[in-house]
Amino acid sequence: MLKNYLKTSIRNLINNKIYTFINISGLSLGIVTCILIALFVWDEKHFDNFVPDSQNIYRVYNLNKTETAESFLAVCPPAYKGALANDYAEVENATYCMRYYNKATFSKKGEAFFEENGLFAEAIFLNFFGLELSNGNAETALAEANSLVISNKLAEKYFPKQNAVGELIEIEGNPYKITGVLAPFPGNFHLNIDFIISLKTRKAYLTPERLAGWGWHEFFTYIKVKDGVDVQQLQDKFTTQVEEVAHPITNQGYVDYPLFQKLQDIHLYSYNFEYDIAKTGNIHYVDAMSLVAIFIMLIACFNFINLSTAQSVKRAKEVGIRKAAGAHRQQLIFQFLSESFVLVLISVIIGGVLTEVLLPFLNSFTDKELVFNPISSPLVFASLLAFVLIVTLLSGLYPALVISKFEPLKAIKENKSGSSTATKLRQSLVIIQFVISTLMIFGSAIIYQQLNFLQSKDYGFNKERLVYFRLKGDNMRRNLESFKNQLLQEVGVNQVSACYGIPGDIVAWDAIIQHETQKTISANLFAVDYNYPKTLGLEFIAGRDFDVNLKTDSAEAFIINETAVKNLGYSAPEEALGKELDWNPWVEEGLKSGRIIGVVKDFHYRSLHQKVEAAVLQIYPTAYSFILASIGTNNSIPNSLKGIEKVWREYAPENPFDYQFVDNSFDKSYQAEQKLGSIFIVFALVSVFIACFGLFGLISFSTAQKRKEISIRKVLGANQFSIVKMLIASFSKLVIIAACISLPLGYYYAQNWLQEFAYQTHIGVGVFMVSIFSIVAISWFTIAYHAIIAAFEKPVNALRSE
């Protein structure tokens, strides 16, 4: 019996090729989209789960408050770790680490390479996170100064086909002993690690006095609490300690409030943290992708159900004949269900094959290592099986129950067109499909409008053709002025500056003191040379630039931005000129005192997710770490870079030349939005494509039902244009209703998304018009084919049976 049902089902599907193709294509697209998004979302929501006792591990971070702003800092003072480990019985263990800023120069046998993703860590770091070594002892690998643990990738690179443990390698010219090689660990660990240096290596820098400090933000701190600990209560107690001990010391422009973050939450809930090294996603984007998957799957399923019910009505005569021949109602129900089952099963198989084909592209786009294997994964297999059964029931049960009730004589005699309830149901499903599709189009338009706004906004300085690179080697530092002068001789190099503070990259955060009132404000500090404002092209609105002929500028001059003027309490930039400021230098003892000589227009040195804060520029050679150069036109960029590299090799031949462009650094800040926009546009096209499949099938069914009506209209004098117009209008109203529902929803969610940016685009009428026009034009194109065929058909073909 079952074999007969399946044979009959396959025969019916073959006989209705267009219906079968549309249903399988739409459902397969929905399935592959849903699977790909599900794999991505699953991976995003399962970061750090492999770490032993991950449910008991927390990262300590800070809510940093100033008079004018507050922000979340991923870094903490070193005293946090000592206090938590020693003063609280609830804490089982604690550790911290420091980032290795920028790229490190690894040298072996005269060859040098830049390596990224480095840390300074304590001896317990590896065991704390359950990171295993393929070679070496995890307990002792980081116990001694100048010991180094490297990834398997670096071990293969520098010591192919040999055990790297015990070997020596130079980093920045200093020898390090390799004491361990990391075994491969899952990609969903929140830290990118290629090498770890023992924290004891920095013992000259990390004096006991500095490690006991409550105001130096440099450490990423983790604690492991004991089972059953009330973490909120522990956080409250520690906050009280910080308020009592640290606030009297640090309450000079800012205060910190410590917060505890679950290890598993770091990846998705740290997207707005500053100074973070974690691989961060965004829970809002992950949730948005989840909704996209649900929407597309709903469109595909609605489309499938809609076409199934429409097609079943056309088979009323077949049902009548079967019942007249003795078929029972349950047999007819099983027949319809078996047809739906075959369609869904084929769609799932095609969707699975497409997933395997497309998964490498998704992995490349997201930098992941996602795997789809329903055979070896019981959860995936069970999910697919449940999907087959549910969609089979939803798409097959309704038509089976309705059509199987037809009386044989009426079903054979009448051309049953379906009840008004069924028609309204199909129309409602079409509206829902186009509501979702219009939302997707509107969302894509808003994302790209915001990205265009971010890229075209005036940043307050000339960020195009600004190249920067890190100072390397003692020779370059000792002969810095000669190095800069030689760079200026190269083709297309217009301005050169040595500095610490690169817009779009690294910027220092500190406090300055208003000498007159002793008021302390938090500010972003730029340690620069005389040429920095010219190199960036900063606009002065009061006062003057640094002057190399005024020797006092190096010791006594400050340049501030407009926001700093406001935060210091001055009503106008001119009022700030000549006022005294004090600053506590990073290395030297005592205060540096000077006067404000100039005020520049606010410039964006961070991404537009954040508002411009107070900025202070001063000449401070001790901190110089970068060279910033303004180079010529786009055509001369390659020659300028070759010239810069040539000079580089004269001063630091042992180091490879590596550079970045400032505008590219800013673009990296918006990578998540760029990827979201690309994904949205792809899935918007998929959703529209599936919805149009459904509309195509439905217009086919509708025009078939209206053949006699159309023919009678033509006999009575209606022309082809009026027939096409009538058919397009009858379906266009459904699309217009969908647009009216979706656009207010889209506006609401777009406004919420834009709140993540301090500077936002305006949602104008144009976006609404583009969304409506796009969806209406697509629907008209879909309807037009059948409408034109129906309009030009000879009336006699439809009326001859009368």
Image (tube, rainbow, N blue to C red):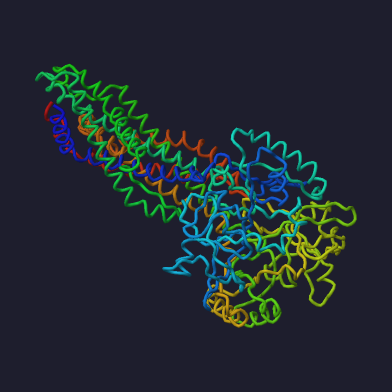
Could you tell me which residue is drawn at 63 percent across and 49 percent down? 273
Residue 687 seen in the figure: no
The answer to which of 468 and 534 lies nearer the viewer is 468
Residue 135 image offset from top left, x and y in percent? 48, 60
Among all residues in the image, which is located at the extreme right?
A: 516
The answer to which of 39 and 761 lies nearer the viewer is 39
From the image, which quarter does the N terminus lie in?
top left
Write down the quadrant of residue 456 in the picture: bottom right
Residue 414 image offset from top left, x and y in percent? 17, 21
The reply, left or right, for residue 613 in relation to residue 785 is right
The answer to which of 571 and 145 lies nearer the viewer is 145
The reply, left or right, for residue 294 in relation to residue 247 is left
Could you tell me which residue is drawn at 57 percent across and 72 percent down? 170
Marker count (numbered): 0
Judge whether 346 appears above or below 174 on screen. Answer: above
From the image, which quarter does the C terminus lie in?
top left
Residue 697 image offset from top left, x and y in percent? 27, 37
Could you tell me which residue is drawn at 66 percent across and 75 percent down? 495
Residue 203 image offset from top left, x and y in percent? 70, 62
The reply, left or right, for residue 708 in relation to residue 238 is left
Residue 464 seen in the figure: yes
Write down the quadrant of residue 628 in the picture: bottom right
The answer to which of 583 and 99 lies nearer the viewer is 99
